[in-house]
Each structure stands twice: as C-alpha cells, then as structure tokens.
Amino acid sequence: MPSPSPLLRSPANPILTAKDVPFPATLVFNAGVCKFHGEYVMLFRNDYGSAETQTLHGTNLGLAYSKDGIHWRVHPRPIFDWHDDEVIRIYDPRLTALEDRVYVCFAMDTRHGIRGGIAVTTDFERFEVLSLTVPDNRNLVLFPERIGGKFIRLERPFPVYGRLGQERFDIWLSASYDLRYWGDSELLLRVEDVPFANLKIGPAAPPIKTRAGWLTTFHAVDFDATRGKNGWEERWQKRYTAGLMILDLDDPRRIVAMSRAPLLVPEASYEVAGGFRNHVVFPGGMILEDTGEVKIYYGAADTVECLATADVDNLIEWCLTNT
C-alpha cells in the first residue's frame, strides 16, 4: 500500500477567488507563482462571465503580490492581454525566476491551433515574447537554472492524428541555448507508465532543485464513462490528479523516481463540488523555502486557487518509497 501523501492543504484555502479580484472575474485558477525580489508573485488565469447563468465571455491574466504566500493583493487590472485577428486568448501561466528575470510560460489559443509560448519580464508591465511553438503544444514549464549550459523545459504536445484520434498525451523535454530556438526534444514520461492515469499526463509546476534531484510535479487525467454532471457542463467524465517525480540534477532526461501513487487527489469540498469542472487539481507553482517547506499552488475545480505544503525531505522520501 502506498504511504499517505505528505501534503497538507492550507487552512486558508481557497487562497484566491473571484471575489478577491477588483475587475470582472468569475473563475480564478491555474496560477503560476514564484519568488522575485523577496516577494511572492502570482500570475493567475481569470475566465470572466456569469456564474449565475454559467456562461463565460473571455479570459485574461491577473497579477497579485504577497508577503507571506497566503494573503494576496491583486493588481487593479489585467496584464499581458493579447488578442488580435489570430490570437484568441492566452492562459495557464507558469512563472520561473531565473537570472534576475521572470520567464512566463503560457498557453495560447489561436485560430490555427493551440501554441505554447515563453515571454520574459522584469517588472510585469512589459513582456517580451521569446518563442512560440507550432500547434499543438502547451503546458510548458521552464527549469529555474541552466543545465549543461542549456535552458531546459518540459512540455505536452498533443498529436491527436498521430495517436489515432486518442487523447493519449505524454511529457516531453526540450533544450535551448537562447530560449528562442528549441530542440533536442525527447520523450520523458509516457502516460502508460503512470498507474493513476488512463488518458493523458502533462507538466504541472516548474521543478525545484533538491539534494535528491529536480522535484517535479505533473498532472494526470483519468476517464470514467459513468461519471455524469460534475460542473457547468452536461457531462464531465475526467478527473485531474497530481503526481510527483524526481529527475537527475545533471541529466533531467533521466527519471530517478516516480511515485506510483498520486501526490494530490481531489477530495476537499472546493475541489469536488460547486466548480466549473469538479474533481480537478492542477499544480502551477512550487516554491522551496529556506526552512525546507515546499509550497505548492494549485487550481481547484477550474474555479479557485489553493495552496498545499510539505517538508521537502518528506516529499523526497515519499516519492522514493512509493516508486
């Protein structure tokens, strides 16, 4: 039997909801979080519309700051808003502080496919887009330091045609010398290797560096045809859980350990009921404190943003034990 997960949900959960946002907001979730210049910074996805009529009108990104990583003050307007004749929306940001800059990985819906992008900022007012993938790719996450002189990212391409129309997607790894041109792409983790996923997997929060290797979360999806109405839609038959693996410090293409049990499963009330899509947890930010505490920020039910914590040594031991 797998040992219980070492994660503890914050008693303050949800730590950010639509009511905390000073501009039109309905679903606030899937945030990227990092520490930058001594302060916690959050970039969150906001789908706005009407919860009463269960309709959505669009998506933007909101910015928030915190002194303690729990209580947040939200910037008065959306940022990095990108809409034009080709771009429909950007969403699901991930933040990596690296070399005195913050890199924003994001997903982009366009009229010719879904793309992943990387932008850089130093002030969260001006953003320079460094690279965009071809369709269809997203869930990009960037490692917080160069490895062997290269920048490394995880990603989740979703080749429906190549998988015979099936939603069977995996985690890949790519490298770059300049963050603009990416290559050396390799398959890192296959969905069939994850016992708690029967549909697809993908990157979650950017990895953190530990004594045992790169501690890395991923999302895992299981499908059950007997599931009925679990949110706004007529049927929501998927469940999103979170997994944990350790990648080699010098060669992150090598998986040191992967837990065969999920790290986080939808169980709390704000994860399983009253949301846009219930039974969903999706980590987007992970911070290792000087005390050894790990903060994992995650979206719940595609509706609110939450926090779970654990001791880093306990996370490592749990992952190694349950491999």
Image (cartoon, grey):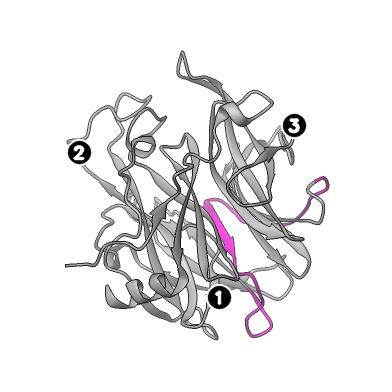
The amino acid at mark 3 is Arg
Outermost residue toward the top? 53
Q: Residue at x 60, y 51 (%)?
A: 69
The amino acid at mark 2 is Ala
Comparing labels 3 and 2, the label whose residue is closer to the camera = 3
Q: Which residue is mark 2?
A: 225
The amino acid at mark 1 is Lys
Q: Which residue is mark 1?
A: 209
Q: Are marks 3 and 1 in contact (CB under 8 Å)?
A: no
Q: What is the spatial separation of the Cα atoms under label 3 and label 1, in whole angstroms?
A: 33 Å
Residue 256, x across and y down, in percent = 39, 81
Residue 8, x across and y down, in percent = 39, 55
Q: Residue at x 71, y 32 (%)?
A: 85
Determine crowd level at label 3: few under 14, some 14-19, many 20+ residues with C-alpha closer than 10 A. Answer: few
Vertical relation: 86 (above or below) 133? above
Q: Is residue 139 magenta?
A: yes
Q: What is the spatial separation of the Cα atoms under label 1 and label 2, in whole angstroms?
A: 39 Å
Q: Which residue is mark 3?
A: 77
The residues colored magenta run 125-151
